[in-house]
Image: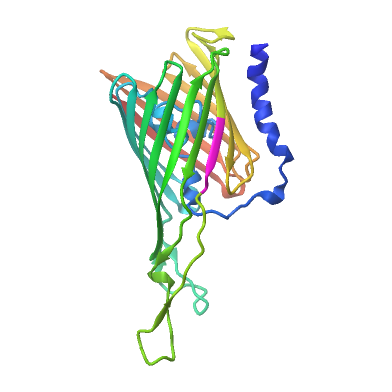
Amino acid sequence: MKKILVFIFPLVLFGQYRSIPDVVTKVATSAGSFLKLETSARAIGMGGSHVASGRGVSGIPYNPSSVAYVEKNEAYFSQVQYIADITHGVLTYGTRLGSSDFIGLHLFYLDSGPMEVTTAEFPDGTGEDFKVLSLSARATYARSLTDRLKVGGSINYIRDRIAETDMQAVSYDIGSNFDTGIYGTLLGMSITNFGPEVQYKGEDLIVPVDGTLDPDSSLQRITDKFPLPLTFRLGIENTLVGPNSAFLKNENNTVMLSVDGIKSSDYVVYGSMGLEYGWNQMYFLRAGSHLNHDTAGLSLGAGANIRLGRMMLTIDYAYVNYDILNSTNQFAISLKF
């Protein structure tokens, strides 16, 4: 009976969104949408499913409790040429403080590259450029409460700058990872981007006023306040094949299933599902899909662990098909020491 429940749970998880009408999407009603971008190459290769399967510092934005899997020290770096010539990258580090306490730092940046300024008078461009620069800096603490339960939280400094207009805020994440004891099933949950409504301010919102005695007279435009994209994730992980699998034991080969259900405050319920095949915990192949997502579809990935003395170097690659927005390729490296 328990084995049946392991396979039924993902179907129940994703069956819920069918009853939500498309008109209640709230698309484009939040600020800081870059906070929803997927940042882990391993996760991306499995369709973005990572809330239960995240291991180490790359999983911090998905579930802050993932840093509790760091053995000693771990560093991670990735950079990707995203769609529309946008570049984003990650630099993160985590360490174990004791037998059950862990901390991590996670930096994410996004650079739109130069874009041409256009106005009503110059629709073909003024000859000037502007950029969009976004930053997210998380400080994370996690604790292993028992050998089966890990919890964590992050405080996140956010900045989004569009030309000379910007927004700054502080948000919070919480998460947990629980070994249910039901045929090796892990349950992960997280709430991310919990924070106040934000407002953009800056020089670009200052408008000169003509026809007054004061030549420096101006007005300050006031923008509306918007919420951050509050996101709830619930997911499971199960090793279907492997040395400790409850289904099919194999000393050299592993097959892991990961499934996430995701609800963002500015989007419908959607999900992700992925598989990871491993050989001797050294080489990995991944495949996954985004479910009920408007652009992201099939994803593929691969990884390799390379022993360097007492250190372990991991190289990961991920490919995602974004339909009409083309596809992206991402590489990442991590070092455990």
**Callout count:** 0
Residue at the image position 46 percent from the left and 48 percent from the top: 195
Which colouring convention does the figure follow?
A: rainbow
Q: Is residue 199 left or right of residue 28?
A: left
Q: Position of residue 228 (x, y in %)?
A: 50, 50
Range shown magenta = 229-234
Viewer-side residue, 31 vs 83: 31
Task: Find out whether residue 164 is within the magenta segment.
Answer: no
- Name above or below for residue 87 compared with residue 8: below
* Residue furthest to the left: 309
- Tell me the quadrant of the picture where the N terminus can be found: top right
Principal SS element in the magenta part?
Answer: strand
Residue at the image position 47 percent from the left and 44 percent from the top: 193
Residue at the image position 71 percent from the left and 42 percent from the top: 20
Q: Position of residue 262 (x, y in %)?
A: 58, 37
Q: Position of residue 215 (x, y in %)?
A: 35, 88
Residue 47 seen in render: no
Residue 183 seen in render: yes
Q: Is residue 262 left or right of residue 81?
A: right
